[in-house]
Image: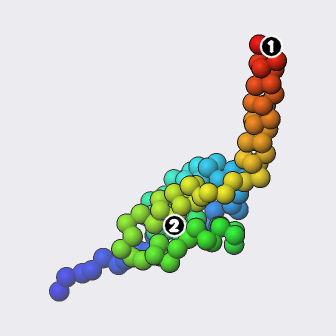
Amino acid sequence: MTEQTPKVPPPSIQLMPFWPDNIEAWFCYAEADFYEHGVNDTRAKFLAAVKALPREFGRYVTPSMFASDVSEPYETVKRSILKRGDLTDRQTLDQLLNNIDAQHVLQQTCCKV
């Protein structure tokens, strides 16, 4: 009779609240937490990230990401959120201010000619 090694579930971790105004930094901190707590399993990372997301970000999590045949669910959800089309208020404001600055420079350049 052979002994079977008991299956140990991957470590669970609760991440800090999600930062919708600085998503890239939040993922960096999440990955630091994973490293610090020895969480290497991509499914454990995925579940921790999904649980930390606010409701309005649920649209970036698809049922197929929960399938057992998805090899990198954490990276998949991370990419889905980072490449999202809508900008945060801060990003929208930055773009608006950059456009105003560009228009101002263009007007000054045209007036000098």
The quarter of the rendered structure image containing the N terminus is bottom left
Left or right placement of residue 96 versus residue 77 in this view: right
Left or right placement of residue 79 versus residue 111 in this view: left
Q: Position of residue 10 (x, y in %)?
A: 46, 70
Left or right placement of residue 100 versus residue 60 in this view: right
Mark sitting on residue 46: 2
Is residue 50 shown above or below 102? below
Q: Position of residue 104 (x, y in %)?
A: 81, 28
Tag 1: residue type? Lys
Residue depicted at x 77% and y 18%: 109
- Residue nearest the observer in this picture, 60 or 33: 60
* Res 45 visible: no
- Residue nearest the observer in this picture, 67 or 46: 67
Name, please, the residue furthest toward the top.
Answer: 113
Residue depicted at x 63% and y 62%: 15
Q: Hey, which quadrant is residue 98 in on the image? A: top right
Mark sitting on residue 112: 1
Tag 2: residue type? Phe
Q: Residues within 10 Å of mark 1 (few under 14, many from 20)?
A: few
The quarter of the rendered structure image containing the C terminus is top right
Which is nearer the N-term, disc 1 or disc 2? 2
Residue depicted at x 60% and y 58%: 84
User: Dot 2 lies on which element?
Assistant: helix
Q: Hey, which quadrant is residue 54 in on the image? A: bottom right
User: How far is mark 1 from mark 2, CA to CA?
Assistant: 56 Å
Q: For the image shown, how many numbered marks are present on the structure?
A: 2
Q: Position of residue 85 (x, y in %)?
A: 62, 57
